Image (cartoon, rainbow, N blue to C red):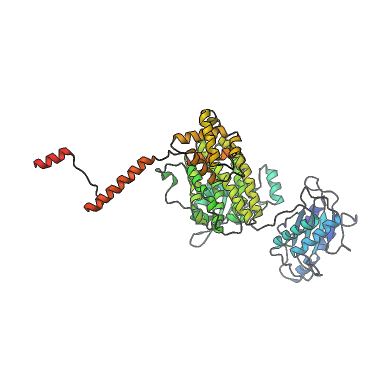
Amino acid sequence: MIAAIKPAGTNTRGLLAYLYGRGTHDEHFDPHIVAGFAMLGMPDPGRDENATLTELGRYLDEPVTLRNSEFGKPVTDHVWHCPVRAAPEDRYLSDAEWGEIAQRIVQAAGIAPAGDDLACRWVAVRHADDHIHILATAVREDGRRPKLHDSGIRVGDACREIEKDYGLRRLEKGDRTGARRPTQAEMHKAERLGWEEPSPEWLQDRIRAAIPHVTSAEEFIAYLEASGVEVQVRRGPSGDLLGYAVGRPGDVNEAGEQIYHPGSKISPDLSLPKIQARLESSRPEEHPTARRNHPSTPWHQAADALDTLHTDLADDTHAQAHITALGELLEATAQKAPANLRAELHVASKAFARAQRSQVRAEDRAAHALRSAARDIVHTATGPDGSALAVLVAALVWAAIVAGRWHEAKNHAHQADAARQAVQHLQTAADRALAPTLAELTARPPKEEARRVLAGDVRAAVPDHAERILADPAWPALATVLADAEARGHQPHQLLKEAVAQRELTTARQPARVIITRIQHTGRNPAPNRRAEAARRRSTIAGSVLAQQTGIGRLPVVTPSPAEQQHRQRR
């Protein structure tokens, strides 16, 4: 059950006209009052043909009118409106049950506390099977204003109790970290203008897309402006940036003025101070394109950064920072991925946004590596090769699973659910990303004898999951990966053990695919020649000892050739 308290209104009669009207799509039927502050003597235009909306509106507004006549400054924001809706799968609720629910809602909100004879006037109007609208005038009978601070939290708690008492669908308790839901007016406006989503959601997508590209608040503002977002900034006397608000082009009010939304109102984690803290924690020492000497691509570096995620979640403040940065990496990957994966990754990124924030304070500097990886990806000029992308998306799947488990352990129900939704889309993207690689590997399997030996390696290295791996349709491709790695000097048995150590296989849908991406990541480089490495160490040690004995220090010892020795003897 959802109770959504709307912004305070000014026109009681106007809201009543909507509640008793036909609706925007003729969806209202049989509007009538199911509960109110004083049912006796209260006119109900839905049941009494002689009652009018004007009469009911005046009846509800009487305390407001009286207060305004006695005080110099009139009350104008007095209309309190709260729709209460049951879930689609909930049972039918009678008028009496809806009336009881309405009574509990206004008590929790502070509109009409239990036993208070001087509370606000209110009515609950039902014009559909699955919901009611509670309308109250927020001036008490004694002329005082009700205490409505944090009323949304109290009403949400009351709804959780109502669900339990009436056997309705149980929703999770809110934690004040959710993004603001678009209002009905914003949704109707988007539909009228042909927009796919309301302005707040459109703006949230643009803000989150900007964060991986910038390293300071000023860059952030400039990037938003360059991407077509209307930006309004607030600065101090010194010129320092103090706050910002954003608007969607074409979203104007009745006077034709641009409508702006503060970042903190769009989502709690998009306030300027929180964005600044994240940007300052990941400011690079040099531009990503200047890193010429690193042998790995940004995509492999990102996978490297994700390898240690499960060990970085031991400290709560570090865990929250890494999960927030994981969302930025997911957004960056979605932006630079090939077209066939981009839509699925964008949906995953949007779903994971709810998992990025909780009541736990984040120690943003702890997630420097992940944020740097995200910035490297959005600044790279070339896209990933197929195997690198498959490795990264597979790593993102596991990272989202780990993040969801951390949220579950902390009883962050909304965040855990968001992580689960993201995992579903990431798994679809991972399957698509790996498909070309699987086809190429399957087309060149090792010989039958070599495959039997490799199967023995699987049974020895991963005995608990060996049969699932060998029964996986991707096993022939995995055999090719192991054979290729062995040709580069790796030991298949050791690679298998290392791959399983990076991620447990119990929850893996297709364990062979998981191992393929892990081995392609960890075993992509040739194995070092152990004999050459040992000889190099011996040579280095001998040179150091000789330098110490001769007192030459760091200068190299040069042995003259036989010709040079003869020349010196003649001299």
Q: Is residue 190 left or right of residue 306?
A: right
Q: Is residue 59 left or right of residue 515?
A: right
Examine the rendered structure and indicate whether residue 157 appears above or below residue 394.
below
Task: Name the residue: 59% across, 59% down.
Answer: 360
Name the image quarter holding the N terminus.
bottom right
Name the image quarter holding the C terminus.
top left
Number of numbered tags placed on the structure image:
0
Q: Position of residue 195 (x, y in %)?
A: 66, 43
Q: Is residue 46 visible?
A: yes
The one nearer the camera, 60 or 65, is 60
Q: Position of residue 540 (x, y in %)?
A: 30, 47
Q: Position of residue 493 (x, y in %)?
A: 50, 40
Q: Position of residue 399 (x, y in %)?
A: 57, 47
The one nearer the camera, 305 or 269, is 305
Examine the rendered structure and indicate whether residue 123 appears above or below residue 353.
below
The one nearer the camera, 253 or 446, is 446
Task: Name the residue: 90% across, 56% down.
Answer: 48
Residue 262 appears in which quarter of the rendering?
bottom right
Q: Is residue 252 visible?
A: no
Task: Name the residue: 55% across, 42% down.
Answer: 462
Q: Is residue 539 left or right of residue 145?
A: left
Residue 53 appears in which quarter of the rendering?
bottom right
The one nearer the camera, 501 or 97, is 501
Examine the rendered structure and indicate whether residue 288 appears above or below residue 132.
above
